[in-house]
Image (cartoon, grey):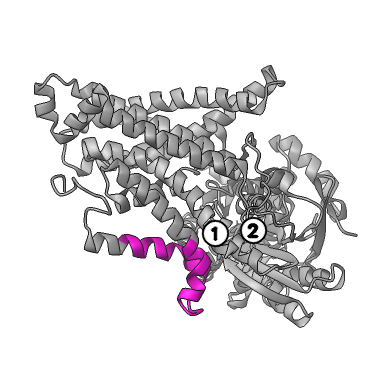
Amino acid sequence: MDILLQQIVNGLVVGSVYALIALGYTMVYGILGLINFAHGEVLMIGALTALQTLGVLERIAPDLGPLAQLAIALGVAVPVCMTLGFLMERLAYRRLRNAPRLAPLITAIGVSFLLQTVAMILWGRNYHTFPQLIPTTPLEPVSGVFITPVQITIVVVSALMMAGLLVLVNRTRLGRAMRATAENHRVASLMGVDVNAIIGATFVIGAGLAAVAGVMFASNYGIAHYAMGFLPGLKAFTAAVLGGIGNLGGAMLGGIVLGLVESLGAGYIEHLSFGFLNSSYQDIFAFIILGLVLIFRPTGLLGERVSDRA
Amino acid sequence: MKSTWMMRAFALASLFMAGSAWAEVVVKIGFAGPLSGPIAHLGKDEEYGARLALEDANAAGLTLGGEKVRFELVAEDDQADPRTATTVAQRLVDLGVRGVVGHVTSGAAIPASRIYDQAGIPHVTPSATSPKLTQQGYRTSFRVIANDLQQGTAMARYAADTLKLRKVAIIDDRTAYGQGLADAFAEAGRKLGIEVVGREFTNDKATDFMAILTRVKARQPEALFYGGMDPQGGPLLRQMRQLGMNTQFLGGDGACTAEMLKLAGPALKEGAYCTQSGLPKTKMPGGEAFFARFKKRFNMDVQLYAPYSYDATNALIQAIKTAGSADPARYLPALQTIRFNGITGPIAFDERGDVREGGVTLFRFENGAWVAVP
């Protein structure tokens, strides 16, 4: 029983990270119909910028407490990534907004390669150790389940970020303009919405979330390197599709479901397949579920507005 | 008028170039390993080892058939990926290399070895330790390092005899290397009375191991054997501690690095052991001098297998020297029977192409470092 609970906790933590990243994918898709494949790379830039900042802090203010260090690192990484998100949209995607769908998609893949290579030049190819500012030693186990403070932080921060984003989109002027733009660029601009600014803002917010996710990811696993964004980016994309791409609630649900399925899949695949499969097939579960959902609900679990785009 | 002038200039220039090519023959030696990706640091390490050997040979000067020979390194990035490795191998063959140092990983070396066999070009790997490589029966495959069977067996013997372990769980990363190492450990362990209580798998790009570690934990092993590299090994060890596991940790050479110490951080405690094919610096006949020279030349420390890469390159050079020819067909027999004292120890190959006296060293984690067990 405690094993099952532990697997659920493992899944929730991974799922929260996926959900946080998936929000960035889904926001951009909701408004532009573009899958921003460079999103995972923004996460990586966020983590490495934070790492760089921590390195500088170590030298100029070694007496700072770990939480203050973390706050400053985030305070640098988030604006850097936001600027990056803004530039990405302005330089790479804006001029392709009315191009055939394939063009921005391929550009996104190109931007992803570009960012990875730039990061490789700046930070080298080695894996870097990310300082564990939030303690990673497990707390007193509750009914056999081990949880570390950093894992709790990840779940809480993700939940707060998601709640904040929902409020932003549903309750503010900016959010209303975003929803209007998502519905129809032209009509929105006729109604006095500055579409370019709104799309820019979407990229900026998405990149900010990715930066937070990057720092969380790096402090949980204690590592950062130039290719770290690729796999979580891919998983988060899967999560966004699973939940219904373009739908914020769907991205969160998709992230959590994917995390749980992965964790439970790896934990129980051997029992479920009567010893035929082992944990080297753990990813099979995530993609079987994705396949099934897309067959029976082509718009994802909560999907709403895919058909008009596709 | 103008074009004639250009043509004359061109003819003159090519004459000069032909003249300089006459004075020395360039012999291209290929290197293939991961120069990008998670283990690029290990690839670069070996590339530098090979480069140093060729620079030494050029400095010493070698003449074949009255012509001065200059060795040139052609380094290609195989990304430690089986598919890229075959492309890279083909490219090296097409570029006309006379021998290859590499590949770095077994996953890349095994598919590439077939291409070298077809082209008749010898390749000497400094670090691909999977037994499969030399079991394929290719005459052109050589390695200067002990293979996994020897490494896994050495660890199993130590675990059974000295550590008195009886229940061990195994995780490997499903690469040819990780799997080969884990299989060798499991098989040797079984014979020595070690029960494998859990066998889990991950991959060489994973960062999260909580799910499989939770499974391992449920089986309550005395130790976990990990077959894989340090970028996964470090986080794996950290996550073991996050789950409150104080199980002992056993690893192969991929986890036996300075990087591992950094990546695992405080999660590495007493009760962690690893093996390295080959010998520690202090036990290499030419270790100290090589490490110092390497540092001076490349301004970085030896990561892992640069000394073996140096010896692998020298095996090719020595064979070319002995045969008096850089033609692969002519120096291949010389390579098979070569015998010289490398900086890592005596280099001589058995009928499969494995080094005859490949040492394995056991390390124990002690005071923040890997310390060779005497």
Residue B56 seen by the camera: no
The answer to if A181 sits in the magenta stretch is: no
Please tell me which residue lies in front, A149 or B121. Answer: A149
Q: Residue furthest bottom?
A: B191
Figure quadrant of the C terminus of chain B: bottom right
Identify the image quadrant of residue A222. top right
Q: For this rendering, which residue is in front, A42 or A23?
A: A23
Q: Give the side of residue B252 with respect to residue A290, left or right.
A: right
Disc 1 packing (10 Å; few <14; some 14–19; many ≥20): some
Place of residue A34 in the rendered image (x, y in percent of width and height, measured from the top left): 25, 40
Q: Callout 2: 10 Å neighbours few (<14), some, many (20+)?
A: some
Q: Is residue B165 above or below residue B83?
A: below
- Measuring from the top left, give residue B349's x and y in whole percent: 73, 71
Q: Are marks 1 and 2 in contact (CB under 8 Å)?
A: yes
Nearer to me, A177 or A309: A177
Position above or below: B372 against B40: below
B164 left or right, relative to B108: right
Q: Is residue B249 visible?
A: yes
Q: Which mark is residue A5?
A: 1
> Residue A144 bears which disc, if any?
2
Instruction: Residue type at mark 2: give it.
Output: Gly
> Residue B7 appears at what percent x and percent y?
33, 33
**Callout 1: SS:** helix
Quadrant containing the N terminus of chain B in the rendered view: top left
Q: What kind of residue is marked 1?
A: Leu
Q: Which residues are magenta?
A: A264-290
Please give the name of the residue rendered at 20% of the width and 47% of the height, measured from the top-left corner: A304
The chain under label 2 reads A
Residue A109's place in the image compared with B214, above or below, is: above
Which numbered tag is attached to residue A54? none
